[in-house]
Image (cartoon, grey):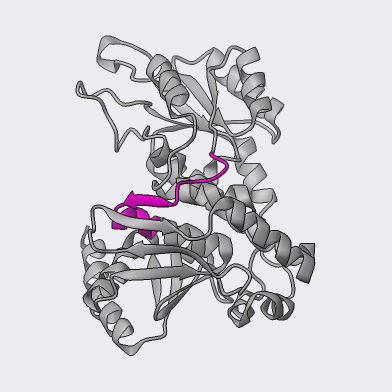
Amino acid sequence: MNLARQHLTLLLNAYYELDEQTITVEHPAPELGELLRIDLSDPAASTVSITTGAVSYEQHLEEIEREYGSRVREELPNCAAYVKALVASGLVDIRNREEVDKIIDRYGYQDLQAGHPPRYAGFDTNLLPWRMHDVLGIDPELYSDDTGRTPVNGYTLPAGVDKELSISYRYDKNAMDAERLADALGPEFERLAGQPTEDNRETRLGLREYRRLRETRPHDIVATEPGDEAIIEGCLEYYENEPTGVILFSNDYGFVDQARDRKIPAVHVDFAIDVQRQLTGSWDQIATLLYVFAVTFGVVVLPKATLYGVWQTKAPQNWRQEEIHVDARSGKLEALLERDKPIVDAHVASR
């Protein structure tokens, strides 16, 4: 069964109905094993225990590289991506929240009724996979202050970023042999044949976010070539003769420094090296984490179900709809999902 990211709460609810209120999230590779443990007792404030912290995760990656080589290690998220996935879910915050908020407070929250020019947000390629509109709390359709002003009024979408995401995304050109991958990481990986490599799965998350913003939010498409300098120069030229302005966000200090040198407001978004072992979050946040983990790892294993972020027949429409494949290993779990999914589908279709 395929489930969209926003409907993965159906899976959590099924566990709850089966009285499986504590579930583990594991990787098939024995060197990695259990990544985290989730207590589902409160849909608004569930406890997520990080079993494998970032430092331990890095050590496990080194063990896998010694045993199977660098190509197998590259099929797993690196330590930074492991932390960023937790940030993307909303369970973990960025490290420099105060600095980012100061920049947004200074340049955002434009009073359009008073004639202030709109201010758009632009994301560097390295941030787009990690759901920054939610993490930073800036989306104009989701966040506003008590006067109705929004942090930003839309998004700047440089064509160079789109090109960087599109160029680096490939299905099978660089994909590792699925049989070899299965021998190293677990038989589940046989189903990843012909699908993107790990770094390109991250890229695909970013491409989906870029296109979602283009399809659903106010935006400016800025004609640029790929590369930091070209993207920054393109934004400078575009807004030089426009009433709007931009705040640029990046995980690259060099990008931020170049933007500031050109007098464009820019801020570095910083991620922690490791995370707390006990986190609290909603089922929606946990569902997002399961989605991002499934895509970046390719496969994660839960009690009674295996989640595939990619599989042999995954099509572009599955990426657009942010779907993963849920392989229920329990008849009771499968029955609950089959009972509830048509209700959700009918609700979505009626909107």
Q: Horizontally, is 30 left or right of 98 in the view? A: right
Q: Horizontally, is 143 left or right of 131 in the view? A: left
User: Residue 226: x percent and y percent?
Assistant: 69, 36
Quarter where residue 124 is shown: top right
Looking at the image, which residue is at 54% across and 39% down?
272
User: Residue 119: x percent and y percent?
Assistant: 42, 21
Count numbered badges in the picture. Answer: 0
Looking at the image, which residue is at 24% across and 68% down?
344
User: Residue 311: x percent and y percent?
Assistant: 56, 74
Q: Horizontally, is 21 left or right of 130 in the view? A: left
Q: Magenta residues? A: 272-288
Which residue is most to the bottom?
331
Looking at the image, which residue is at 58% across and 79% down?
188
Of residues 177 and 313, which is closer to you in this image? Answer: 177
Q: Quadrant of the C terminus?
A: bottom left
Of residues 98 and 287, which is closer to you in this image? Answer: 98
Q: Horizontally, is 30 left or right of 179 in the view? A: left
Query: Does the magenta-highlighted stretch encompass residue 284?
Result: yes
Q: Quadrant of the N terminus?
A: bottom left
Judge whether 208 appears above or below 22 on screen. Answer: above
Quarter where residue 204 is shown: bottom right
Query: Does the magenta-highlighted stretch encompass residue 59?
Result: no
Quarter where residue 340 is shown: bottom left
Judge whether 241 appears above or below 301 on screen. Answer: above
Judge whether 298 appears above or below 18 on screen. Answer: above
Looking at the image, which residue is at 32% across and 51% down?
281
